[in-house]
Amino acid sequence: MVKQRLLIAWCFFLLSCMAATQTGRPLHDAKLADTYWCHLYRPWEAAPKDVADALGYQPCHTTGRILRLCPSGDLEIYGGVLNKVNDSDVISLSVGDGLTHFVGKWEASGDKVLLEYRLDWQDFPPIGQENAPHPVIREEAPFDGEKIVLNGQTFTPMRSLSKETIEDLFSCPPRKK
């Protein structure tokens, strides 16, 4: 009886996988989906000592991008100023400091991630280009299980993203402007 139930459950699992593949719904690697990936443009920089003394802690900042690959096949990328407290793993995005937002789709394909995305909005668009259309970017990003190399930029999994940043900015599927 137990073997029959296991066989039936296995058949349902296989059928659901086949249905997902036939409907074009991407099947994603668990190491990729629903993870926040980060690229830093430069090393973390500590605020001046007088600022740290006044605050009672040592704030640090840098610029970078955060990529989220949703299990649904959606993706979003935020770029801008990243903040953290000295040795903390919790990172936040500084809203209003030149934030950019990209949206699109992704799919795992062997040792690559296929991405198609475009700029959705930015805090400070170039003058005269505020309403200009944004081209679609298509990339095959190598993935070795530990990092994604997107457009020459290495993204690694983040240890922690602030709850406020997640609640205010990220959603699956992405919120578009």
Image (cartoon, rainbow, N blue to C red):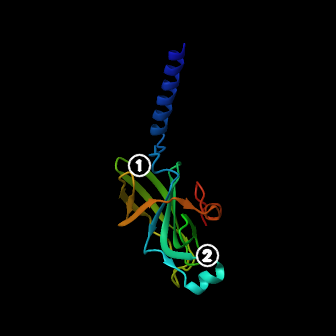
What percent of the width, then of the height, locates residue 105?
48, 55
Q: Amino acid at mark 1?
A: Ala
Find disc 2 in the rendering and name its residue. 57
Q: Quadrant of residue 60?
A: bottom right
> x, y (%) of residue 70?
53, 52
Between residues 111 and 116, which one lies in front from this camera angle?
Answer: 111
Question: Vertical placement of 92 versus 140: above or below?
Answer: below
Front label number (1 vs 2)? 2
Measured Cα–Cα span from mark 1 to mark 2: 41 Å
Residue drawn at 59 percent across, 60 percent down? 170
Residue 177 or residue 107, whichever sits in front? 107
94 vs 150, nearest the viewer: 94
Circle 2: element type:
loop
Residue 46 image point, x, y percent: 52, 79
Q: Quadrant of the C terminus?
A: bottom right
Amino acid type, callout 2 = Tyr
The local secondary structure at tag 1 comes to strand
Q: Earlier in the sequence, mark 1 or mark 2?
A: 2
Instruction: Tell me the residue at 55%/60% (across/down).
Output: 160
x, y (%) of residue 28?
46, 46
* Residue beneath disc 1: 108
Could you say which is closer to the camera, residue 4 or residue 135? 4
